[in-house]
């Protein structure tokens, strides 16, 4: 399906439109468009931020390019919205023309670098300025749905950033308007993951998509990274035209076992699967839950590595039950790639 958004991957160079325009939202006032010199608004988008002295700060915005670690998901760059020692409640918006009554689905990928420095508390904040370390998550990728955390003080760092995707089916510009439909929030750190999708039905000839990232604490580094935004029409016709029966059919029936790696797993984890299984089983290995479940096969087995990293221990199980019924779902947990080799060899 074609992407209805312009510059959804944030690949367009800023010089194509050269805008510092942004939408400032002050408590109790109407949203107002202003220019801010250190906000480099990406072409086709408009940056918005909530502003309240001592509470919500004006962020900075720029391209997120190749570095260590990489801060884009695909292509040459993504986008970062960030503050220093200040809290933020900010995001992006884009208006899109659609036919009234169209049902649309908005998705985007995101993650945070959430890192603090306090010389008086080195035991609480042990890795200041380390670009690989986020408070609460450490060096590992983390994804958790809003409301899934226990509430313990040990998870304070994980609560800092929450990401949302939203749609205003009326085409308005205010992210706090009652007409905006927001998806479920998610806490995402250190590696890109998809923010929970949101769907809405247009009530005019224009709809608006919103992204939002909000922080709880004024950490030194509060960086929200965004990439790969997509807006697509959802097929809600009562009798869609079926695809040809032969499309996607396997040549013969065979048993497939797909080793599904979690978000953020690097090449060491994929090599661990190859080292443990290639000579004896030649399992399929990858990081896409859809790839793992798809296919008109009588025997589809998914072996999920560290499934809790998808947002909780049951998120993947429920996903396959809903979208790919018939999958036989298994799990394996391992702290390191080396441990995964040992467990797969014993499997």
Image (cartoon, grey):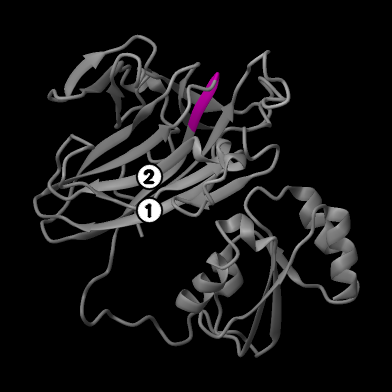
Could you tell me how far apart the alpha carbons at marks 1 and 2 are, in whole angstroms? 7 Å
Q: How many residues crowd mark 2 within 10 Å: few (<14), some (14–19), many (20+)?
A: many
Which stretch is magenta? 220-224
152 horizontally vs 146: left or right: right
The residue indicated by pointer 1 is 184
Which is nearer the eye, 207 or 344? 344
**Vertical order, 290 against 263 (above or below):** below
- The residue at 58%/32% (across/down) is 71
User: Residue 201 at x, y = what percent?
Assistant: 18, 59
The residue indicated by pointer 2 is 164
Main secondary structure type of the part rendered in magenta: strand
Does label 1 or label 2 sit earlier along the sequence?
A: 2
- The residue at 64%/44% (across/down) is 141
In the image, farthest residue toward the front: 152
Q: SS of the residue at dot 2?
A: strand
Q: Is residue 171 magenta?
A: no
Q: Quadrant of the N terminus?
A: bottom left
- The residue at 56%/27% (across/down) is 65
């Amino acid at each position: 399906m074609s992407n209805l958004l312009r510059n959804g991957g944030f690949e367009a160079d800023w010089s194509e439109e050269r805008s510092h325009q942004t939408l400032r939202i002050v408590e109790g006032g109407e949203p107002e468009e202003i220019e801010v010199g250190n906000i480099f608004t990406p072409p086709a988008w408009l940056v918005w931020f909530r502003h309240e002295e001592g509470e919500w700060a004006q962020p900075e915005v720029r391209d997120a390019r190749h570095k260590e670690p990489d801060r884009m998901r695909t292509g040459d760059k993504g986008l970062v919205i960030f503050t220093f020692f200040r809290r933020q409640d900010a995001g992006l918006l884009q208006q899109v023309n659609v036919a009234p009554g169209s049902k649309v689905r908005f998705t985007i990928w995101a993650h945070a670098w959430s890192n603090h420095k306090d010389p008086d508390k080195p035991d609480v904040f042990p890795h200041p300025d380390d670009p690989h370390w986020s408070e609460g998550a450490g060096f590992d990728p983390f994804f958790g749905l809003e409301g899934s955390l226990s509430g313990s003080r040990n998870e304070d760092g994980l609560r800092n950033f929450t990401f949302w995707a939203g749609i205003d089916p009326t085409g308005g510009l205010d992210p706090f308007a009652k007409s905006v439909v927001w998806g479920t929030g998610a806490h995402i750190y250190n590696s890109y993951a998809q923010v929970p999708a949101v769907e809405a039905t247009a009530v005019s000839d224009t709809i608006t998509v919103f992204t939002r990232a909000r922080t709880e604490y004024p950490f030194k580094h509060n960086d929200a990274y965004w990439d790969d935004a997509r807006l697509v029409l959802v097929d809600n016709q009562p009798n869609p035209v079926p695809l040809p029966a032969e499309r996607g059919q396997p040549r013969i029936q065979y048993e497939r076992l797909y080793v599904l790696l979690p978000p953020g797993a690097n090449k060491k984890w994929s090599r661990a699967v190859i080292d443990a299984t290639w000579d004896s089983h030649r399992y399929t290995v990858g990081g896409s839950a859809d790839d793992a479940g798809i296919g008109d096969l009588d025997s589809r087995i998914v072996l999920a590595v560290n499934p809790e990293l998808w947002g909780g221990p049951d998120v993947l199980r429920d996903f396959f039950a809903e979208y790919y019924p018939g999958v036989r779902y298994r799990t394996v947990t391992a702290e390191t790639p080396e441990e995964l080799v040992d467990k797969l060899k014993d499997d």
